[in-house]
Image: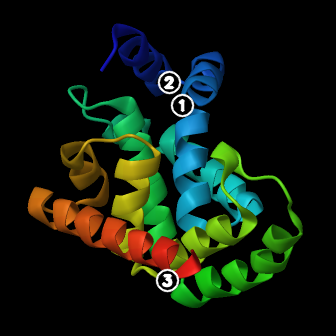
Amino acid sequence: MSDDDGALIAAIRDGSESAFNILVDRHQQAVRTFLRRLLGNDADADDMAQETFLAAWTRAQSFRDEANVRTWLCGIAWRKAKGAQRSWFRRRARDTAHHERLSSTGPGGASMEDRLAIRAALLALPLEQRAAVTLCLVCGFSHSEAAGILGAAFGTVKSHVLRGRERLREAMEQSA
């Protein structure tokens, strides 16, 4: 944990809204990126990110000082996402599929078909596997950090990432 984050958490514990605003500004992109990839819908991910930060505000006393703040926040986000019903994820994925098909630009030069195949393959993964893949391959967390966020064993996260990467590769080969 950086000294700056430690000072922010201490101030938040004392009720400082300005410290909380700085914490949100500093870490909201990581939380939103994780949730957007996990949920497959930007609006829902943004709503859940707000819920995550609200929970962080109300539970600042539970933060362990030796922990990493970004990891702690993503852990809160993961528990919130996991608590949502699977049907919610499926419904939102279906709702966004049409919007995604209308979009014509792709990051990194990926074709629309490739992006849709990757998105479909990612959303088809079991929730825990999708979370591990998103944390490690998209958000840049280590397997160890992802294990801490997900409350899973290191080996389990490593297996989820390996299997998820393989399924994504297969989806790309099928779309080619």
Q: Amino acid at mark 1?
A: His
Q: Quadrant of residue 170?
A: bottom left
Quarter of the rendering occupied by the C terminus: bottom right
- Disc 2 target residue: 12
- The answer to whether residue 138 is above or below residue 26 is below
Residue drawn 70% across and 66% down? 41
* Residue on which disc 1 sits: 27
Residue kind at label 3, given as amino acid type? Ala
Closer to the camera: disc 1 or disc 2?
1
Residue count near mark 1 (Cα–Cα under 10 Å), binned few <14, some 14–19, many ≥20: some
Mark 2 or 3: the one toward you: 3
**Percent position (x, y) of residue 99?**
85, 71
Tell me the CA gap for discs 1 and 2.
15 Å
**Structural distance between the alpha carbons of marks 2 and 3:** 39 Å
Q: Residue 165, how many percent across, how many down?
A: 34, 65
**CA separation in Å, label 1 and label 3:** 28 Å
Q: Residue furthest bottom?
A: 87
Residue type marked 2: Ile
The answer to whether marks 1 and 3 mark residues whose Cβ atoms lie closer than 8 Å is no
Instruction: Give above or below for 49 relative to 2.
Output: below
Residue located beneath label 3 in the image? 124
Up-down: is 138 above or below 66?
A: below
